[in-house]
Amino acid sequence: MKQAGINVTPRTMKRWLVGTQRPNNANLEKIDRAYWMFRRQNVAKYLLKRLNSRGGTRVEIHPLDQSRVLVPRQRVLEYRKLNIRHWDAIVNAWAKGDSRMLDDAWIDQMVELGSQWGKYEYVTSVGFSA
């Protein structure tokens, strides 16, 4: 809570917890940010362990939806598979919420696809299946 900039007395914190007082809007925003930061850090630890186990995790990269792209400008994109052996940079960037660092970490992995890596440089999401 202190890292999130929430500086209240123990008495105020107790009132919040028992429900006799509600945090103001500024503190609610700080509490929400603190929750998501803490959650990302915990999820990141789990993801790193799972994704790096047994030599990495195979990723399926599906072509983007080009239905809104004019036909002459559409590119031929094929479905690709890639085994990412070290997820540390990707997961750490995600946990920090640093989109620039995440972009760089993703590109570092995509170059493994060879000369056509640029076709798979931009993604809108990465999903995991249990």
Image (cartoon, grey):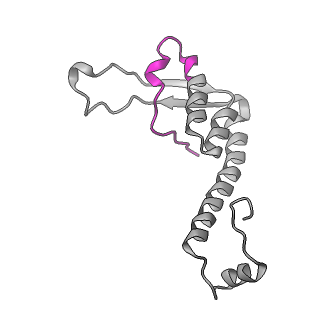
Residue drawn at x 59%, y 24% is 109
Residue 127 percent coordinates (x, y): 52, 42
For image coordinates 68% across by 60% down, the residue present is 4
Magenta segment, prevailing SS (helix, strand or loop): loop
Question: Toward which corner of the image does residue 36 lie, by quadrant?
Answer: bottom right
Image vertical order of residue 24 relative to residue 89, above or below: below
Residue 114 vs 97, above or below: the answer is above
Q: Residue 79: give x, y in percent of width and height.
A: 43, 25
Pick the front one: 120 or 94? 94
- Residue 126 at what x, y percent from top left? 51, 39
| Residue shown at the point (26%, 33%) measured from the top left | 67
Percent coordinates x, y for residue 33 in the rendering = 61, 59
Q: Is residue 61 above or below residue 27?
A: above
Which residue sits at x=72%, y=65%? 1
Residue 12, picture quadrant: bottom right
What is the magenta range? 110-130
- Decide if residue 115 is on the left or right side of residue 34: left
Please give left or right for residue 94 compared with residue 53 in the image: left
Asked if the magenta segment contains residue 50, the reply would be no
Residue situated furthest bottom in the rendering: 20
Q: Nearer the viewer, residue 42 or 24?
A: 24
